[in-house]
Image: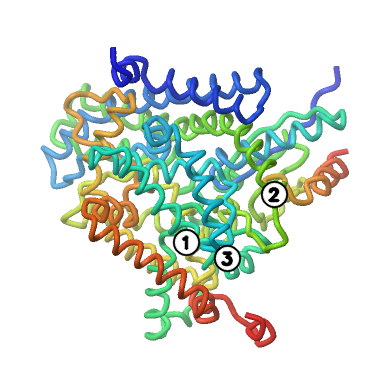
Amino acid sequence: MKEKKVILVVCGSGIATSTAAAQEIKEKLAERGIYVETRQTNVFALASRNFEDVSLIASTCRLEDDYGVPVVNVVPLLTGINEDKVIEEIIKKLL
Amino acid sequence: MSINEIFNTLGSSIILPLFIFIFALFLRVKVGKAFRSALMIGIALLLIGILVGFFTNQITPSVNDMVKNSNVHLPYIDVGWGAAAAIAFASKVGLLVIPFAIGVNLIALVLRLTDTLNIDVWNYWHYAFVGALTAAFTGSIWLGFLAALIAELFSLFLADWMQPSAAKYYGYEGISFTTISSVEYIPYAVAVNWILDKIGIGKIHLEPKVLKERLQFFGEPAFIGLVIGLAIGLIAYWHSLNTFQSWVTILLDGIGTAAFVQIFPHIPALLMEGLIPISNSLKETLSKRKSKRNIYLGMDTALCVGEASTLTSSLILIPIAIFLMVVLPYNKFLWIADLTSFPWFIALITPITQGNILKNVIIGASYLAIGDLIITKLTPLFTQAAISAGSKLPSEAVGIGAGSEGISYFHWLIYHAIAHPLTIVLVFLVYGICIWALKHRRNAMYRATGYIVNSSESNQL
């Protein structure tokens, strides 16, 4: 069995907003036949984390540092405006 | 058995899931999804009660000994905003706050009192929390709803006022920020920022990059928990450090506090998960009705938290808050879990100061000195509300509170205003003036929040 790719979902608390975003990402990707695993964290914890386990960072915050993995801003998934564009971007950077 | 008795016997971890299940079905969420939502919410409420109980049982004896054996008189324990969210949703106001707040928002939109549609259903708990505590304070559910209404109207006004500045600074077009624990500090920040500019402090700039790297370890909840837990134990048993028992307690306080602070914030994520199908269903229904009018979507300030200036200012405030809680003679509140919540406190101050860290810290620290007074006054009420929401506290526990919610002058003013018809009228008068000012003194209002109004725009406004 092929291993699922992991997306790290980041928000201010690693709790509320990122839960909503993670759910959206999983559902929207599943509709297109792509199954991923999501993990959540907050912006504070990014500095002390390594990113070997993740293929992509999906953030609801503006991230300014370079983490060595592609970063996608996923705020549109929360507002519902331009959702498809973000999903396309995730797919492009993930594969 | 009366309805009230049934309510109290079953407890919020049964009643709220039932309500959510029915409400979700009503919004045409599929049965399986609705059931899962309800289950998650029940689990979250139960776990919040258990964890708060575990933590207060561990730390209370040491806190009591600390108060007895030293000059550190801080008997009110900070259990964090998760407990406040549980109290809010578990209260009788909380059950109905979602339909209520949406109704109020839609009416306010139609009456042109606001341009914001608050789709951040999760943070409705802040409205419910004001309502729940007011209901506990006054004994009237109706006054609880009136309090929630006032909180919502002001949060929508503040979101509108701040919109151009925050959207420009953080780069989010068409979004306004409605989270009460962020927007309520806008007026204070505008006033202090004006004073700081007058005395020339605005010219000093600190570079966030270096500071951020040095301070990052303060942002790790487990670390803060460990240090504070050990400190409480050490101060409490300073005079008996030669006994093995003292050291066992000190070390258990350290690891216990670290465990609580690390794991507790994950429980509200379950509450959130339970609410997602409801909030998605509402979002779809609401956005279908969007008119031609330019409406901002109200979101959580969590979107702003990663920005360097906001993050750095919040990290600097952590040691300052610890210093203030010890030296301020009137303070009884022991900051623990919500020390890491400062980004929400600072998020909308940053655009006002245009990212000036020194100004942010001065505004933040000076407000915390006031906030410590407010939270010392409000914690007994919070404790009472937590017990009625199902937290099992040790009998000798003096008080529990949530730092980020407790320092709110907003809550404090609302509870007091609501006690008298005359002050209620006054509150709506102030609200009227706010709305008038935003309509007729628009440029000056925007400029105060750090927004630069350019000439071509000001012609249109």
Is label 3 on the same chain as label 2?
A: yes
Foreground residue among B209 and B187:
B187
Q: Is residue B328 left or right of residue B3?
A: left
Mark toward the viewer: 2 or 1: 2
Quote the CA–CA distance across marks 1 and 3.
21 Å
Chain of the residue under label 2: B
| Parent chain of label 1 | B
Give the label on residue B9, or none.
Answer: none
**Side of B9 where B461 appears, left or right:** right
Q: Does residue B31 appear left or right of residue B77 in this picture? A: right
Quadrant containing the C terminus of chain B is: bottom right
- Residue B420 image point, x, y percent: 21, 54
Residue nearer the viewer, B214 or B427: B427
Above or below, B402 against B177 in this view is above
**How far across and how far down the image is residue B148, in percent?**
39, 47
| Residue at screen point 29% across, 22% down | B392
In the rendered image, which residue does mark 2 sit on?
B289
Q: In the image, what residue occupies the spot 40% across and 42% down? A: B224
As drawn, B428 above or below B191: above
| Chain letter belonging to callout 3 | B
Amino acid at the residue labelled 1: Ser
* Residue that carries the numbered disc 3 in the rendered image: B163
Task: Point out the tag, 1 or 3, that comes first from the N-terminus.
Answer: 3
Residue to which mark 1 is pinned: B313
**Amino acid at circle 2:** Arg
The residue located at (24%, 46%) in the rendering is: B378
